Image (cartoon, coloured by chain):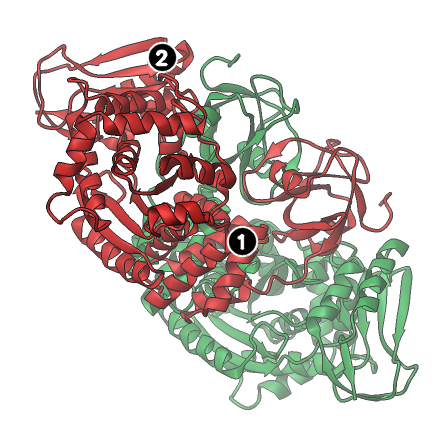
Chain colours: A red, B green
């Protein structure tokens, strides 16, 4: 023990552990000794006026000198610390809200105040992944009452930033703000840019925030980024929406639901979709942007997120209840989720499909077009500005007249300018080995090929899918084309393709 | 991408992440790119014929060169890999048993086969801490039926090693093997060495395996290690027990329940004691050593593990049911858990108490002695070799005649020789600031002082506690004495002492 008290010198090792904060200390530091490294230790790190809780890893080599400490990249960012700065390390006082999680595990109903404290601690980074997992698990499997889901939604709303629309926009919109959301899992289902264009061309206000891909080949934000800037601050979002009536921005930059960003990652790791978390996640972000009339697209299919009509209906009922309480008029549209939508899977390829539909090109994917029109039509009707039954027709007029395209270009311009999507340099067509009818498509495996080819980081990478269910293909016909920006990545994708037999089923 | 395929060169960084396996890779490796680091990625690492699943951390500095990979210490150990060896990295195929955990989360009852697969994957290290936490949480809060607890216990038994006693011992014991277990949480409650000595002096067979401290200042294995060798292999345990009728060994080296070792750490992190996990943990280890007559000590107190008689009774009922099915005759003894037992808290100090009782010294802590006699008496009666009501008297005779001490020394000799416990070099008496009666003792805070003073790593460190509840103390009397092996650690303990006001309450 060569250092005095609990002060240590920060040395950056550059270890990115994702959200969870980690501290790295030598095994001869007294914190390790007194807490006993046999436990999964959590310690408090203080730097100036800032303080975080971190999980302790012990360094058993000379990577750190006596008196040094390192922190994971997220912790470095949270503290704003620089090389050679001093931190103090102290034993962790109890995190009170963890006792609420234990209470929930034992089947008790939590109060709104308890959910608020839990969400606050999650935002502060006071929970390890073990704690986040316990919270997610304790709230899953229909263990949350409708009141608790409402409390959780409220807590998430409170934890994030909110957009306050100026008086001019409030006047223009008459307080009516529309939105749409898709309960994901379907490659290429990129209806959002088309729906926003139609709704805003009609005159509705639609400040759309979207996510980037977490485990999929592209999120709407990734796709839009190929054509325009999506990294909009709250001020910029307000500015674009005031000008054009709508936007398509990346939601996380706006920090609308910081707790949700962490919980979603843990849910993915356990691979559960807790109804409560899902509803709170979606609705809290909608309330944050002031949306009050929302269409929810629920694709149902064997390899989609919702695998049965029953699951979709159950989610629908609960979601409608919570929406009602938080002041949102909501309509759920259950759609077909058996195969990819459009042709492109990957940011640029999906952007090409979107533009093709907006430009009314003859080769535009009709399934994407019709799906967008269905949802846009429902949205127009939900707004009360179009009579029931006329929505689809109205939406079609706005799209086919070119008005939607015009609006889309204006929104892109307001966000920072429009660019045509790039085309990947390396492409390989996958041919059918036999003749027959396509009867099944494995969405997850197609998505995996697109990711191995480089999507979403490599914008032009992905898969162009040409053989939808029901299509008759001859031996040698192209089923899909893999796009990549490097030979190596094309090789990875092909290696995976060669190892799988059931990506498409032809009979 | 300067490396070919998925082969990387191992470089040791010496990062100890505890049980969970971590891999460290540069951000420009294709695994990071294709899986998307936005997710909490798990990958498969293969080295020769061995293979593990690890969580991915990304290195954003020059800590690793192109083509290099590092692994956490536990992963290095599991693979047996050396510097510059080659590994291959591959995408993770689905871990099937995770779907059973999801099923449990959704309220389904799991089959014996499903528990077996879950426990097998845990032993292999295929679960991240997120998955372990989800499993622990899904099984907590009375969500396990008695049948499921039996399945879990069976799965844990199957996952570990078992002791097969030779024919000579089987003949000698007549198949009767006794044991005791304490549902922990009480500092200084070191009755085990005394009970084993009495039971074996009586002629019973008692192959006792104990744990080391996880978050406490000493486990029985830590205390025994001060006096003899506890790192016994299965073969050595068999040898000692054949010779002396009993042993007091460290259980983990014997690998009796490898899944349990991991689950316990996660339970501590969430701070829940799942009834199901607790029962499976205790009983699986007992079955592994062939025990069939067991006394369970359940101390109940505000700062003990079991905080109410109701909680103890609930655990008792469930434990008796499961014990019956797995062929164990079990008796639960509910005891007082309101304050430490004996004087010593810490390995050597507790060993001194144990020896003092065994040697019938006049200053021996009477509470420890009477507690050991109570439990030993119950054990003698449970064995059927002593009539009901005579156990305590019989136990007392064996102790006070010195026969138990003789047997203890023989067991120590058989395990590797006996040593007198050391006395710490640095000691500080804590004096009472006022006169009055001790009315309350905070077990957790006293334990913390002992740990800050260096226990259990520093064997002689800890607290000698002299003011039990009900004692009348005068201002200036010694309440307890802190023992440490270094000045620095004595200072840490005193710093904590000075920051707390309610370690002892005197009125």
Report helix, strand or loop for mark 1. Answer: helix
User: Which label was assigned to residue A424?
Assistant: 2
Q: Residues within 10 Å of mark 1 (few under 14, many from 20)?
A: many
Left or right: residue A162 compared with residue B73? left
Q: Which residue is mark 1?
A: A122
How far apart marks 1 and 2 lie (CA) works out to 40 Å
Earlier in the chain: of badge 1 and badge 2, it is 1
Q: Residues within 10 Å of mark 2 (few under 14, many from 20)?
A: some
Report helix, strand or loop for mark 2. Answer: loop
- Quarter of the image where one finds residue B135: bottom left
The answer to whether residue A196 is above or below residue B304 is: above
Q: Is residue A444 visible?
A: yes
Q: Chain of mark 1?
A: A
Q: Is residue A338 visible?
A: no
Residue A237 position in % (x across, y down): 45, 38
Q: Chain of mark 2?
A: A
The answer to whether residue A433 is above or below residue B489 is: above
């Amino acid at each position: 023990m060569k250092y005095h008290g609990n002060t240590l010198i920060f040395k950056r090792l550059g270890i990115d552990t994702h959200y969870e904060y980690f501290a790295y200390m030598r095994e001869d530091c007294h914190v390790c000794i007194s807490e006993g490294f046999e436990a999964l230790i959590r310690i408090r790190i203080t730097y100036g006026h800032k303080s975080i809780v971190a999980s302790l890893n012990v360094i058993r080599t000379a990577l750190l000198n006596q008196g040094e400490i390192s922190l994971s990249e997220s912790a470095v960012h949270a503290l704003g610390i620089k090389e050679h700065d001093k931190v103090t390390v102290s034993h962790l006082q109890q995190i009170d809200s963890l006792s609420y999680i234990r209470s929930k595990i034992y089947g008790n109903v939590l109060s709104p105040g308890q959910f608020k404290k839990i969400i606050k601690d999650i935002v502060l980074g006071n929970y390890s992944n073990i704690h986040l997992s316990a919270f997610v698990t304790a709230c899953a499997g229909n263990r949350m009452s409708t009141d608790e889901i409402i409390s959780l939604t409220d807590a998430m709303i409170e934890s994030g930033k909110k957009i306050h629309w100026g008086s001019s926009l409030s006047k223009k919109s008459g307080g009516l703000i529309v939105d749409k959301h898709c309960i994901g899992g379907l490659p290429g289902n990129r209806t959002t840019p088309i729906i926003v264009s139609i709704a805003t061309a009609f005159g509705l206000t639609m400040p759309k925030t979207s996510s980037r891909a977490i485990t999929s080949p592209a999120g709407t934000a990734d796709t839009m980024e190929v054509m325009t800037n999506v990294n909009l601050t709250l001020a910029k979002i307000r500015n674009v929406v005031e000008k054009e009536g709508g936007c398509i921005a990346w939601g996380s930059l706006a920090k609308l639901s910081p707790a949700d960003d962490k919980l979603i990652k843990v849910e993915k790791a356990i691979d559960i979709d807790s109804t409560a978390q899902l509803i709170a996640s979606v609705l809290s972000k909608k309330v944050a942007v002031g949306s009050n009339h929302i269409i929810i697209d629920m694709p149902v299919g064997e390899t989609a997120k919702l695998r049965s009509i029953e699951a979709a209906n159950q989610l629908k009922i609960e979601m409608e209840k919570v929406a009602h309480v938080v002041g949102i008029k909501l309509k759920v549209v259950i759609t077909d989720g058996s195969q990819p939508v459009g042709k492109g899977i990957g940011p640029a390829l999906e952007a090409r499909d979107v533009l093709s539909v907006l430009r009314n090109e003859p080769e535009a994917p009709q399934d994407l077009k019709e799906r967008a029109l269905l949802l846009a039509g429902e949205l127009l009707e939900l707004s009360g500005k179009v009579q029931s039954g006329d929505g689809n027709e109205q939406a079609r007029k706005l799209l086919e007249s070119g008005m939607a395209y015009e609006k889309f270009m204006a929104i892109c311009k307001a966000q920072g300018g429009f660019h045509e999507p790039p085309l990947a340099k390396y492409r390989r067509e996958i041919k059918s080995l036999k003749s027959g009818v396509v009867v099944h498509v494995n969405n997850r495996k197609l998505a995996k090929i697109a990711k191995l080819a480089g999507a979403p980081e490599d914008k032009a990478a992905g898969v162009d899918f040409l053989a939808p269910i029901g299509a008759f293909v001859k031996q040698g016909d192209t089923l899909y084309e893999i796009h990549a920006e490097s030979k190596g990545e094309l090789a990875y994708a092909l290696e995976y393709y060669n190892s799988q037999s059931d990506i498409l089923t032809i009979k």
